[in-house]
Image (cartoon, rainbow, N blue to C red):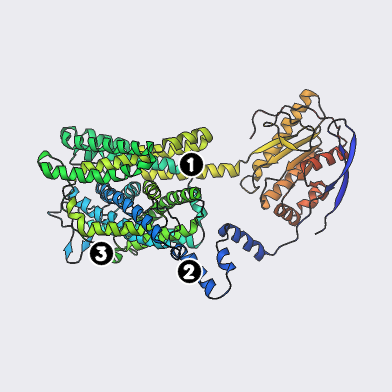
């Protein structure tokens, strides 16, 4: 590569004396083949973290094979050094989160039982559910959902223990995902749960399978960056809105209402509640309110005293035990306190034959699975990364996606709904002192023991207690502090958060998702189609050029307009940039005439922030050059990157502009313009426009 030096005269910053210094010309990089260019871009896109570095370091043979196995099975990283001390910590944390998973599983079963999405889990020759006169009771729906959702803390947890790379992540079902399944599968399916409850089970399992396949595919193909398009602001708004809807739907359990709407929007829920005011019962409300207050008090104590975190962890299970015992002793059904009824014990059978991979409902299940899979991945990735940063270790996002996909595909074949990573359960797992992902395996064993031996004890569990547990948990999901932080830091993000929240609460979860994605896509398109351009001025006493609206001391150089483009130049913004630069020139000349300064002679474009350019962009620069020529103005480019220079050279735009007008820095371009365009050397003050686009 040949580097050409050019000596130019530079006006001194203070006394106007002239000095000489070398200015390095910007070279055109050597050409690269299409294959090498595509390979470099593909590697940068899919493998930015160089995941195979550890494998490449090992010599060929057995050690490299072991390195490959460790990459595929993260559990092999910690198993060789696993000690009794780590086992003890994992057992304690696993039992702790199991005590939280069991009551949450029952509570989310109650939540899912409110909607017609609930499936049917059958044992061979002994169906769990039988319809009597084609009537499905809420109790039966709750039992069906209980088996499916509680199992989500069993089989998927075992899979994640082997494939997951996060030490603190605890997997299981969530109320938001359960409600999302209900809202997406329920209204759109062809049959109701009264007519064909098995169809709903098959739809749920199939949606879970597609969610797992989609998650695993993203991880295998290294496409995890797609999840980043669902911003933190959208997730905060969506989770807050969904949690609000879930909490409002618990009014049915608190008031003992016999019927309830399947809609999830606030107006429909309120109409359903107040239209049945004659059926409100004070007994379940009193029980549920007392348990809710108890749960909130324990949460407050745990927040004030972190060493007493176990109090809030044990509170849901204690609520279940105490309320169940109370209802049993007083014969609660006599006081109109609804219970979940009899629950058969045992592990659910395989459901692989229930998957609808080629039916009229396959697309419905696939759409539901992909959307819920994206949401669970976005939340799970954020939780895993935050915990890993706090403990100073690295979590491979793509490997986490593979682990999520594998556990959901396995879960869909073993009567499980979509499994995610609840933040509250993961935080409890961390606070309990977990050392490895084996805590999930301990939780799975504890949940399996509950399914095998303890489920008959939940017969008298009141539904008001489940509503209290869900409502208390949902208050923790509504992150008011995060929304307030968004309002302080970025108002656009705050608007995205609020729009998503309102869409979920006042319309539906589907509408909320569409609003979130639509607003985010619109924001990205606006950022690309309307990039920011700013005027730069010279800082006295230096060669630095900075934004004039940010640095009050920066002054416009006489006869030169310096503009910076803060985005790639492509077909979406080429026309806008051409018009915007022309407007900058017009405004600058108007201000020069108003203050009687040196007339404009040269326009310098700072290309340092332009990372790429396409054919439309090069055409825009060519058109801009001709437009400025007609106005007797010279164009100069400063600090263009290698790709920019390569594209300008191939498109012949470099020859049109003139390679002598391509500079390493803005200072070089401005100095050269002063010498060649015969511009006065005295700096002048030009007030920048109030509006910087």
Residue 633, percent across and down? 80, 38
Q: Position of residue 108 (x, y in %)?
A: 28, 48
* Side (left or right) of 539 relative to 118: right
Q: Residue furthest top?
A: 595
User: What is the secondary structure assignment of the residue under circle 1?
Assistant: helix
Give the mark nearer the N terminus: 2 vs 1.
Answer: 2
Mark number for residue 519? Answer: 1
Which residue appears farthest toward the front when viewing the image? 85
Q: Which of the 4 image quarters holds residue 483?
A: top left
Apparent side of residue 259 relative to residue 684 in the rendered image (left or right): left
Give the side of residue 70 with respect to residue 264, left or right. Answer: right
On-image quarter of the C terminus: top right
| Mark 2 or mark 1, whichever is nearer to me | 2
In which image quadrant can residue 590 be found?
top right
Mark 2 to mark 1: distance in Å? 42 Å
Between 402 and 306, the one nearer to me in the picture: 306
Task: Report which residue position mark 3 lands on.
Answer: 349
Q: Which residue is mark 2?
A: 69
Return the residue nearer the eye: 644 or 161. Answer: 161
């Amino acid at each position: 590569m040949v580097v050409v030096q050019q000596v130019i005269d530079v006006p001194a910053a203070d006394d106007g004396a002239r000095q000489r210094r070398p200015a390095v010309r910007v070279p055109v990089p050597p050409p690269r083949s299409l294959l090498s260019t595509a390979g470099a871009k593909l590697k940068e896109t899919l493998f930015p973290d160089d995941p195979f570095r550890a494998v490449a370091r090992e010599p060929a043979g057995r050690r490299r094979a072991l390195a490959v196995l460790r990459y595929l099975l993260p559990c092999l990283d910690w198993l060789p050094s696993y000690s009794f001390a780590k086992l003890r910590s994992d057992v304690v944390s696993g039992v702790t989160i199991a005590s939280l998973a069991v009551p949450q599983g029952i509570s989310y079963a109650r939540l899912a039982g409110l909607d017609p999405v609930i499936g049917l889990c059958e044992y061979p020759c002994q169906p769990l559910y039988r319809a009597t006169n084609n009537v499905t009771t809420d109790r039966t729906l709750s039992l069906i959902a209980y088996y499916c959702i509680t199992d989500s803390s069993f089989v998927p947890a075992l899979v994640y223990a082997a494939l997951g790379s996060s030490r603190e992540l605890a997997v299981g079902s969530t109320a938001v995902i359960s409600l999302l399944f209900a809202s997406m599968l329920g209204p759109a399916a062809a049959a109701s749960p009264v007519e064909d409850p098995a169809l709903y089970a098959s739809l749920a399992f199939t949606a879970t399978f597609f969610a797992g396949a989609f998650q695993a595919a993203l991880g295998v193909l290294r496409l995890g960056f797609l999840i980043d398009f669902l911003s933190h602001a959208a997730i905060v708004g969506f989770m807050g809105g969904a949690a609000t809807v879930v909490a409002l739907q618990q009014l049915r359990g608190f008031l003992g209402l016999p019927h309830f709407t399947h809609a999830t929007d606030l107006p429909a829920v309120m109409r359903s509640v107040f239209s049945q005011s004659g059926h409100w019962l004070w007994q379940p409300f009193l029980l549920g309110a007392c348990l809710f207050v108890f749960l909130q008090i324990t949460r407050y104590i745990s927040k004030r005293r972190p060493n007493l975190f176990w109090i809030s962890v044990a509170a849901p299970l204690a609520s279940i035990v105490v309320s169940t015992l109370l209802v049993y002793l007083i014969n609660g059904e006599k006081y109109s306190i609804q219970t979940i009824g009899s629950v058969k014990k045992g592990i659910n059978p395989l459901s692989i034959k229930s998957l609808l991979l080629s039916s009229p409902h396959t697309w419905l299940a696939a759409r539901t699975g992909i959307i819920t899979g994206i949401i669970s991945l976005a939340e799970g990735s954020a939780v895993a990364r935050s915990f890993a940063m706090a403990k100073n270790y690295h979590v491979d996002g793509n490997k986490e996606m593979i682990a999520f996909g594998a556990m959901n595909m396995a879960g869909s074949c073993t009567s499980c709904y979509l499994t995610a990573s609840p933040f509250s359960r993961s935080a409890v797992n961390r606070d309990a002192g977990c050392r490895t992902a084996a805590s999930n395996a301990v939780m799975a064993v504890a949940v399996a023991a509950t399914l095998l031996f303890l489920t008959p004890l939940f017969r008298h569990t009141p539904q008001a207690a489940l509503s209290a547990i869900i409502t208390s948990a949902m208050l923790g999901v509504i992150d008011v502090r995060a929304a307030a932080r968004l309002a302080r830091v970025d108002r656009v993000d705050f608007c995205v958060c609020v729009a998503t929240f309102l869409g979920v609460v006042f319309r539906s979860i589907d509408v909320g998702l569409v609003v979130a994605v639509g607003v985010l896509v619109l924001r990205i398109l606006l950022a690309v189609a309307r990039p920011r351009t700013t005027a730069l001025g010279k800082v006295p006493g230096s060669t630095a050029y900075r934004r004039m609206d940010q640095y009050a001391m920066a002054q416009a150089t006489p006869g030169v307009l310096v503009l910076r483009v803060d985005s790639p130049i492509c077909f979406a913004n080429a026309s806008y940039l051409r018009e915007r630069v022309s407007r900058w020139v017009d405004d600058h000349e108007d201000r020069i005439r108003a203050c009687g300064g040196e007339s404009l002679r040269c326009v310098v474009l700072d290309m340092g922030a332009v990372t790429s350019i396409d054919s439309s962009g090069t055409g825009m620069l060519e058109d801009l050059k001709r437009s400025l020529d007609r106005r007797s103005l010279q164009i100069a480019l400063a600090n263009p990157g290698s790709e920019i220079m390569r594209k300008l050279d191939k498109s012949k735009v470099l020859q049109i502009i003139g390679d002598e007008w391509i500079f390493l820095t803005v200072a070089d371009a401005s100095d050269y313009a002063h010498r060649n365009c015969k511009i006065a050397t005295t700096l002048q003050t030009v007030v920048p426009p109030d509006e910087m686009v």
